[in-house]
Amino acid sequence: MGQNFLIDPGISRWIADQIQPDGADIVVEVGPGMGALTEHLLGRPKKLVLIEKDRQLAPELQQRFAGREDVEVIEQDATRVDLRSWFRLGPLKLIGNLPYSVGGEILRHWLTPPSPVGEAVFMLQKEVCQRLAARCGDDSFGGLSLLVQKDWQVEMLRTVPPEVFQPRPKVDSAVVRLTPRHPSTLPVFDHSLFDRLVRMGFSQRRKQLKNLLPEPPQGWAAFVESLGVAATVRAEELSLEKWVQVARWYENRASADAGQKASEVFDLVNERNEVIGQLTRGEIHAKRLLHRAVHIFVINSRGKIYLQLRSHLKDVSPLKWDSSAAGHLDAGEGYEVAALREIEEEIGLRVPATELAAEIPAGEGTDNEFVQLRVARHDGPIRCLPEEIACGQWFSPEDIDAWVSARPQDFARGFVTCWKAWRAVNSAAAV
């Protein structure tokens, strides 16, 4: 399978130390092979999970660790593991001496947002590590650098020579550490558009960008002036921050990120959910007054529900997981109208109607909101608006159940209340 097994115990111990496994809730090792890294991870985290594809090595590992409750061996291709069930374990630590042949595929599978990984340490071919960690101006800087670094901070830790492997590879290896980039370090942008533009820009490195990118809004001259670069600029001459500016220009984003407006006006209601006045978002939240909100579960034909990770710009529960779409009712607005509006504003969907699933009274569990939970049906892609949503994913109800039970702190409080109400309604219907 193109594996080169690490045989130097000193190097193995050093690599294992880089993930800081002591006392960690869970460490996952991808491709443990004959256990060179595993040996130096044993007994250090509360749980060690080994994922091995090789049909000979996996049973040997299972037999070796059969008596240990803190070690689990999974015989599976690491590029095919369904990561959605792993979110309930909390941000996990990921480590591995990755085979050169599939290292890139493993990186894409585990690190593409949303990801349950909170930190990763990998050994890969040196040239790949250099590309992952390269900055604008480095010889190795390119499209891969940008596609990874928009979501991850990458640190090159050390070079590893061929003689510590069996069989010896023909090239040097290296070790890198990846940690999630906090979204506030960059202005918001459409990540899918960013990826497409970067791939276009680096498709022919010698060509100038004006010959590779689509005609930008307001023309090329205004575009390069906004970037502060020459009209003859090439892809490799733009930093990550400049490439984010490129994506924002193509989105027609001219103003700075402002987040939600505290001046928005909502209906103020009493204990019977009757409108008694109007106040701004800022006043209602500051004084914890009663108001109205809608949550929507978007469900596909396989029964999976789309969950969103709230943007860091949200004034309530930033970077918490939430319903497919959710928001307050504007002054004078009805629940169903608000539901259709929120679905379009947050995840770019226009659906003909939503179904009422539950009505939830205002209280601590809803942040003082009278909530209608509504359901929409949709198959196909979803486009997250970055001001509203950091990213999203389809989850099975069973995975959500396990996740909410294990880590309710990962979710907006209103979602947990809505989820329990929805499960209660569906359990009653099933009976």
Image: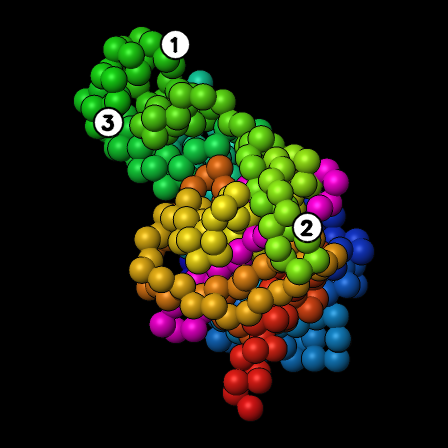
Q: Residues within 10 Å of mark 2 (few under 14, many from 20)?
A: many
Q: Earlier in the sequence, mark 1 or mark 3?
A: 3
Q: Are marks 1 and 3 in contact (CB under 8 Å)?
A: no
Q: CA distance from mark 1 to mark 2?
A: 49 Å
Which residue bears the numbered disc 2? 290
Residue at image x 31%, y 28%?
A: 250
Percent position of residue 194, x then y: 37, 35
Looking at the rendering, in which quadrant would you find the N terminus? bottom left
Q: Secondary structure at mark 2?
A: loop
Q: Are marks 3 and 2 in contact (CB under 8 Å)?
A: no
Task: From this view, report whether residue 414 is shown above or below residue 304.
Answer: above
Q: Is residue 226 visible?
A: yes
* Number of dots carrying numbers: 3
Which residue bears the numbered disc 1? 228
Residue at image x 65%, y 80%?
A: 63
Region of the chain picked out in magenta, as a range: 286-313
Which residue bears the numbered disc 3? 213
Q: Is residue 292 in the magenta section? A: yes
Percent position of residue 131, x then y: 45, 33
Q: Amino acid at mark 3?
A: Leu
Q: CA distance from mark 3 to mark 2?
A: 50 Å
Q: CA distance from mark 1 to mark 3?
A: 17 Å
Q: Amino acid at mark 2?
A: Leu
Percent position of residue 396, x then y: 50, 70
